Image (cartoon, rainbow, N blue to C red):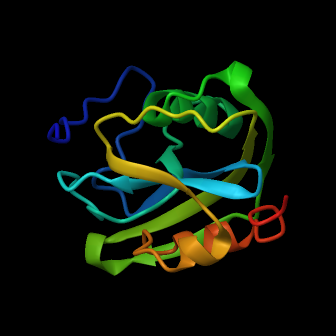
Amino acid sequence: MTAEPMFIPRPGQVDYTHIRYAPVLNAVVVYLGKALLPQRSNDMRSYPNHWCGISGYLDDHRSVEDRARQEMSEEVGITTDRILSMQRGTVLLQEAPDHDKSWLVVPVLVRVRDRRYRLDWESQAAGWFTMTEAMGLPLLPGFDAVITQYRGVVDQD
């Protein structure tokens, strides 16, 4: 495992490290009725070993969809040509007092054309799960509310 690198903002990028409210996207990747869930690396500062969607800060001028495409490529190696569609869900406010954060979460449903993925340093494992299987995992706090928005898509054939 590789340790989490220190965050250094690029020009035009906001550093939310010490800001209470932080906007993030959380993508639920779906193929043939199952969701791809990575398990966060044991070396992550926040929520190590928890299962989640593909996520990232909305910390620059790009659209949610452009950020989702970037995170998909970086975190699981899914390139734009393999994405069939993207759909935003209902924005959620998720309190995390243990991290002194309030997350403004933009859920995104991403349908892909195949099951292939490649993990980066952020994750130690991943798999394709039905809704029932996903709900039995130690999920990132609040991720159950994200994935539940897509109950009709996950588990559908």
Asked whether 33 or 92 is in front, the reply is: 33
Please determine whether, in this image, residue 7 is positioned above or below residue 20. Answer: above
Residue 18 image point, x, y percent: 28, 55
Residue 132 in the figure: left or right of residue 59: right
Residue 26 image point, x, y percent: 57, 53
Asked whether 89 or 3 is in front, the reply is: 3
Asked whether 52 or 19 is in front, the reply is: 52
Q: Write the residue at 57% across / 73% down.
A: 133
Q: Quadrant of the N terminus?
A: top left
Does residue 60 show up? no
Residue 57 image point, x, y percent: 47, 45
Q: Write the residue at 62% across / 30% down.
A: 69
Residue 26 in the figure: left or right of residue 66: left
Does residue 15 show up? yes
**Residue 4 occupies quadrant:** top left
Residue 81 image point, x, y percent: 72, 19
**Residue 13 occupies quadrant:** top left
Please determine whether, in this image, residue 100 is positioned above or below residue 3. Answer: below
Please determine whether, in this image, residue 53 is positioned above or below residue 142. Answer: above
Residue 144 in the figure: left or right of residue 1: right
Q: Write the residue at 33% across / 79% down.
A: 97
Residue 9 in the figure: left or right of residue 52: left
Number of numbered discs visible in the structure rendering: 0
Q: Write the residue at 85% across / 58% down.
A: 157
